Image: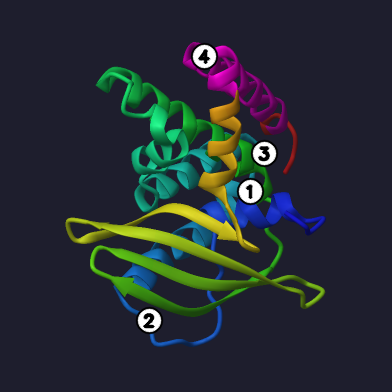
């Protein structure tokens, strides 16, 4: 990420898209838009702005993210060739740990939302695959391209990757995960993910005790 505000950009991209300019949208865009409307509603709700409601607010945002993101598919793509060698139990564990890593890493940044805009720039659909293109407009009017890669599951379109300024979330994690596995084994990757989860839970608890 080249931008100094990359953490906030990624946070917004993962779980928050602000309604922007008019574009002829298809079903993938509509479903993404519906989820993000609900995130905005949570962020703007006076009740959830109370200090004691911090964790409840985060749980609401995570629940919406779980609906729009296919974490198993995201985890599968991030683990790449190492996915096939895992048992179904290991695959489920990894998907859960990976979802927690992404959500807890950026949930605090999402709560820093202060009026950034996203303009929907169109979508492309090929069979059960789609890309929804957006542009994040910062307060200094800098445009940052953010693309959502989605696939159809039943009657729902769910995201499995986010590409920000040409950098893929999945590819970024894939490189890190592959290096850890090759150097220290799959078990060490799981241990690192669990340790990171504990760290983020602790930080979330400390943040939740303060006024947002």
Kindly identify which residue carries mark 1. 49
Residue extent of the magenta highlight: 180-207
Tag 3 secondary structure: helix
Tag 2 secondary structure: loop
Graded by Cα atoms within 10 Å as few (under 14), some (14 to 19) or many (20 or more), the crowding at tag 3 reads some
Residue 102 in percent (x, y) is at: 55, 38
Closer to the eye: label 2 or 3 = 2
Using the image as rendered, state which of residue 181 and residue 3 is in the foreground. 181
Closer to the eye: label 3 or 4 = 4
The residue located at (54%, 52%) in the rendering is 14
The residue located at (62%, 51%) in the rendering is 11
Q: Quarter of the image holding residue 155?
A: bottom left
Mark toward the start of the polypeptide (2 vs 1): 2
Mark yes or no: residue 101 visible: yes
Mark toward the start of the polypeptide (2 vs 4): 2
Q: Quarter of the image holding residue 198?
A: top right
In three-dimensional space, the C-alpha distance between marks 2 and 1, rounded to whole angstroms, equals 32 Å
Kindly identify which residue carries mark 2. 25
Q: Give the dominant element type of the magenta stretch: helix, strand or loop.
A: helix
Mark 1 and mark 2 in contact (Cβ < 8 Å)? no
In three-dimensional space, the C-alpha distance between marks 2 and 4, rounded to whole angstroms, equals 44 Å
Mark toward the start of the polypeptide (1 vs 4): 1
Which label number is shown at residue 51? 3
The residue located at (53%, 20%) in the rendering is 181
Kindly identify which residue carries mark 4. 185
Closer to the eye: label 2 or 4 = 4
Graded by Cα atoms within 10 Å as few (under 14), some (14 to 19) or many (20 or more), the crowding at tag 2 reads some
Give the quarter of the figure containing the C terminus.
Answer: top right
């Amino acid at each position: 990420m080249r931008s100094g505000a990359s953490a906030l950009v990624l946070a917004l991209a993962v779980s928050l898209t602000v309604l922007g300019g008019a574009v002829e949208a298809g079903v993938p865009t509509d479903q993404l838009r519906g989820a993000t409307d609900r995130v905005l509603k949570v962020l703007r709700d006076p009740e959830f702005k109370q200090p004691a409601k911090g964790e409840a607010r985060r749980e609401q945002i995570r629940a919406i993210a779980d609906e729009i993101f296919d974490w198993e598919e995201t985890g599968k793509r991030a683990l790449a060739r190492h996915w096939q060698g895992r048992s179904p139990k290991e695959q489920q564990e990894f998907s859960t740990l990976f979802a927690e890593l992404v959500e807890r890493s950026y949930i605090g940044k999402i709560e820093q939302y202060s009026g950034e805009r996203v303009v929907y720039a169109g979508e492309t659909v090929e069979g059960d695959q789609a890309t929804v293109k957006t542009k994040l407009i910062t307060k200094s009017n800098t445009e940052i391209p953010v693309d959502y890669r989605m696939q159809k599951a039943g009657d729902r379109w769910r995201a499995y990757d986010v590409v920000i300024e040409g950098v893929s979330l999945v590819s970024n994690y894939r490189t890190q995960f592959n290096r850890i596995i090759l150097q220290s084994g799959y078990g060490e990757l799981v241990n690192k993910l669990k340790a990171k989860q504990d760290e983020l839970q602790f930080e979330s608890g400390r943040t939740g005790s303060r006024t947002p």
